[in-house]
Amino acid sequence: MLNIEMFVSTTLRGSAKGTGKVMYTLRMKKGEEQYYEKPPEIGKADGTANRLILWSICRALERMPSERMILIYMENTYIASVINQGWLEIWERNDWKNSRGNEIKDVDLWKAILEKARKVGHNIAAVAGRHEYSEAFAYNMSKINAESNIFAKVEFEEVTPVHDRC
């Protein structure tokens, strides 16, 4: 199974709603060799930081047609906890309700992530905290005009692809 690293950042923080941007890139590792997918993508939408990150994870999963081990680096501790602690399976068993009986926020995206991962056989884990692309993404997100609800391809010097495929 090939290992994929996903790096994702957003301009939104916390649970506040607003218009924000999200940027991600994927990196494949195979043995000692590293391949970078070119180029990173940026999207813009109304929502929360959680929704933008989930949206980018869905988008990335669509780009991986075969089984992968995916490690997602993000600054969002909530989403990382959900992924790492197996909450998706618990929520699914509880009809997408939390322990208090309330419907899960962004359930459409959580369901899509679980469905896409199962369909292909992906294993997903997450690491919360700043990552090696955090500063580059923050800088470039402020400079790039992304259209609403689409991902645009982005090229910037901080990510130098070695190979064009995952």
Image: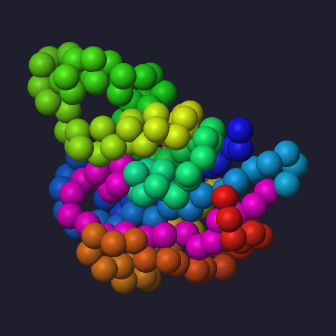
Q: Which residues are magenta?
A: 34-55
Any magenta on residue 43? yes
Residue nearer the viewer, 116 or 128: 116
42 horizontally vs 149: left or right: right
Figure disc tally: 0
Q: Residue at x 62, y 42 (%)?
A: 68
95 horizontally vs 163: left or right: left
- Image quarter (top left, top right, bottom left or bottom right) of the N terminus: top right
Residue 98: where, in percent of width, then height?
21, 22
Please say whether residue 97 is visible from this viewpoint.
Answer: yes
Residue 160: where, in percent of width, then height?
71, 73
Q: Residue at x 39, y 36 (%)?
A: 114
Image quadrant assignment for residue 165: bottom right
Image quadrant assignment for residue 157: bottom right
128 horizontally vs 76: left or right: right
Please say whether residue 126 is visible from this viewpoint.
Answer: no
Residue 156: where, in percent of width, then height?
60, 79
Residue nearer the viewer, 35 or 46: 35
Any magenta on residue 18? no
Q: Is residue 80 above or below residue 66?
A: above
- Image quarter (top left, top right, bottom left or bottom right) of the C terminus: bottom right
Residue nearer the viewer, 14 or 39: 39
Image quadrant assignment for residue 91: top left
